[in-house]
Amino acid sequence: MTLQQPALLTIIVGCAMLIASCSTSPQGGPRRSKQAFGSVDGNDVSIYTLRNKNGMEARITNYGGIVVSLMVPDRSGKLADVVLGYDSLSPYLTQTSYFGALVGRVANRIGHARFALEGKEYVLAANDGPNHLHGGLRGFNRAVWEVDESTPPSEPTLVLSYLSKDGEEGYPGTLRVKVVYSLSDSNDLRIDYTATTDKPTVLNLTHHSYFNLAGQGVGDILNETVMINADRFTPIDSLLIPTGEIRPVQETPMDFRTPHKVGDRINEKDDQLRLGRGYDHNWVLNRSGDGLSFAARVSEPTSGRIMEVWTTEPAIQLYTGNFLDGKSIGKGGVAYKYRTGLCLETQHFPDSPNRPEFPSCILRPGETFTSSTIYRFSAQ
Ligand code: BGC
């Protein structure tokens, strides 16, 4: 059968319209676009905007893989930016809060800034008192990540990679890390991590957005309700290093198996809350199998926004912004005061390199590390 010219034209136009509608946001623009954001050590840095069909928008820079803003609808469809951060690049270069960043090579703390692996001791930067925090002085949050520009702009996906050299920040082995951010039409911001190494090393990757579901700059997070799918947590010492004990949450202010407002118990006279200056702890997730499993849920009563966290990781850190003190001036000139954002960092347990009894964070040559986390947004 041969097609008549008008019929052929109709098919071609139809296909073109279909491709265009799949590749554009409701506003008609592409699902991923790029803007200059400045430069670091002579390397250009950009912001990539990912959009979905509901108008949700994530702006992510390849400096530190930082989520700079995240526009999320409330129950009436009104968008607000739900993460803390800065309007320009320069404050990100010196910040110590890790706003929005990808954190590695080992997120969270390593006690006494040292660990042994296969009989050899490695000494790391002590950048948190005597301890090592979030990968050291120049962790992955301060790296300029390479962007795979070949991914079609019709996809709301950002593919970042980073080569961490052998000995960088004291860690052994050259590590190739790839992180893929993607935004789905069901309002999932998904992060997929993979890594390989040429020598045995340790690895714990996480994402460090401070969420405020009422909108960044709109008060504190004490009225947000949190649920964490964990029967146990790892108690800390005065320097926030796990003692090694794995303690049931039952009958403690750490019990978020049913939803509780962050502020309900945060000021109770409890030893762990005193040591953490609030919540700054690691919960051992209840999980079965290796796949994505439900970890936590946050809901905010005035906007109706809800965020669920799903992960393949064994644990999650809830940090309630206890070190924010109003000195950092963020987006729109807002001073980020005490407890105005909360982090839910999916991860391996803190100090894992020194704790053989914790799930292992060792990566060996020939293995591929994989990890996925979804921040899923809805409103009610
Ligand atoms: C830690 C906090 C720390 C913060 C850095 C969080 O992941 O748990 O103790 O102060 O990161 O800003």
Image: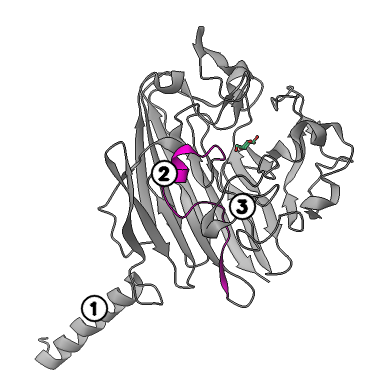
Front-most of residues 57 and 255: 57
Front-most of residues 330 and 354: 330
Residue 179 is marked as 2
Ligand 1 has an atom within 8 Å of the beta carbon of the residue at disc 1: no
Task: Work out how far the residue at label 1 is from the one at label 2, CA to CA, in angstroms.
Answer: 31 Å
Which quadrant holds the C terminus? bottom right
Q: Main secondary structure of the magenta part?
A: loop
Vertical order, 59 against 177 (above or below): below
Amino acid carrying mark 2 in the image: Val
Which segment did they paint magenta?
Answer: 78-97
Amino acid carrying mark 3 in the image: Ala
Which element type, helix, strand or loop, lies under badge 1?
A: helix
Residue 256 is marked as none
Which residue sits furthest top? 119
Badge 2: residue crowd in 10 Å (few <14, some 14–19, many ≥20): many
Question: Which of the two discs, 3 and 1, labels the residue nearer the N terminus?
Answer: 1
Visible residue check, residue 287? no
Q: Mark 1 or 2, which is nearer the eye?
A: 2
Residue in the picture at 70% in, 45% down: 320
Question: Which of the two discs, 3 and 2, labels the residue nearer the N terminus?
Answer: 2
Front-most of residues 255 and 89: 89
Residue 342 counted in the magenta span: no
Name the residue tied to disc 1.
16
Badge 3: residue crowd in 10 Å (few <14, some 14–19, many ≥20): some
Residue 335 is marked as 3
Give the number of marks: 3
Task: Work out how far the residue at label 3 is from the one at label 2, CA to CA, in angstroms.
Answer: 30 Å
Amino acid carrying mark 1 in the image: Ala
